[in-house]
Amino acid sequence: MTNLPGTHSRLAVAYLDILGFKNMIKNGPLIDVARKYDAYISTATGMNQSLCGGSSEPQLFPRHPLGTPYCTRYVISDSIILIADGDDALSCLKLLVHTWRLVQASLAHRMSVRGAIASGEMYFDLTKGIYLGHGLTAAYELEQRQNWVGVAIDESVELAYPEIFPPASGQSSILESLFLKYPIPVKGGGVLEARTLNWRWNMVVEDGTRSLFLPCDEKPGQEKIDNALEYARTVVESGRIYAEDHGACPAELRAMFIGKSEPPFPHGDDL
């Protein structure tokens, strides 16, 4: 396998699962689910590239070619797999930022996502649709362990790319806020201390954070939502909720407004 051109000794991979998707297919007209999912994927496609060409505002990826995706994406029913386009730290950061934005977009469409990002040896062949390896397996296993709506970052990512993650300084830097450490609820009880994608950061919701989640009659599903809302509450209380200097905030991380009014508008409430 080491002689195959698609082999990488380390590669960042994100595995996302649309929660409740099977019930959506089972209980609703397929055409309605397809329209909603198509709109979501179309939004995701538009976000998987630079939209800042020629802009003089601060950017994370000023040299990224226009029209070129930040990462490779596969969609298989309720699963979304994202693979970094290189084994360097910048490619990993592009994957992290795009995944963060993708989770915000899913919530804007009232679709709850659980996921994980890991790094490890990978092999993939775009022409044959083959993708396998330690990074994907680790991301899938970590996704399955969690009991909330949110995305965990496996320690393998920080070990492979320590330059992305600033040391704890007590200061509210953007990357510290974006990749917030948190005791993630896991199935069967207990928590897992890990970095997360802070989907609540720089998100302005007109009707409040709770409006992003569809009501759930089943206890396990509602528990995931409650755990996600507790995460949002913790983010608000920590102050890591918006960029301190919006003028200096990179364009790729600008605020996402979710509401019926024309933005900008104030956040409806903390939850």
Image: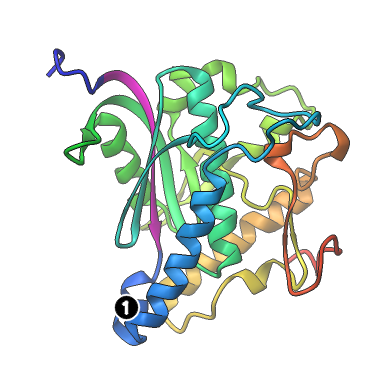
**Can you tell which quarter of the image residue 37 is in?**
bottom left
Which residue is found at the position 66% from the left and 74% from the top?
Answer: 211
Which residue is found at the position 80% from the left and 28% from the top?
Answer: 56
In this rendering, the answer to whether 133 lies above or below 266 is above
Whether residue 112 is visible here, answered yes or no, is no
- In reply to whether residue 90 is colored magenta, the answer given is no
Whether residue 190 is visible here, answered yes or no, is yes
60 horizontally vs 218: left or right: right
269 horizontally vs 185: left or right: right
In this rendering, the answer to whether 146 lies above or below 10 is below
Front residue of 22/128: it is 128
142 horizontally vs 244: left or right: left
Question: Percent x, y for residue 109?
Answer: 56, 68
Q: Main secondary structure of the magenta part?
A: strand
Question: Percent x, y for residue 153?
Answer: 48, 37
- In reply to whether residue 16 is colored magenta, the answer given is yes
Front residue of 20/6: it is 6
Question: Percent x, y for residue 3?
Answer: 14, 13
Q: How is the image coloured?
A: rainbow
Give, as a single range, the part of the protein colored magenta. Answer: 8-18
Q: Residue furthest top?
A: 3
Which residue is found at the position 77% from the left and 69% from the top?
Answer: 206
**Can you tell which quarter of the image residue 271 is in?**
bottom right
Q: Please, what is the three-letter code of the amino acid marked with disc 1?
A: Ile
Disc 1 designates what residue? Answer: 25
Give the quarter of the figure containing the N terminus: top left
Question: Percent x, y for residue 112?
Answer: 49, 64
Q: Secondary structure at mark 1?
A: helix
Which residue is found at the position 58% from the left and 48% from the top?
Answer: 101
148 horizontally vs 121: left or right: right
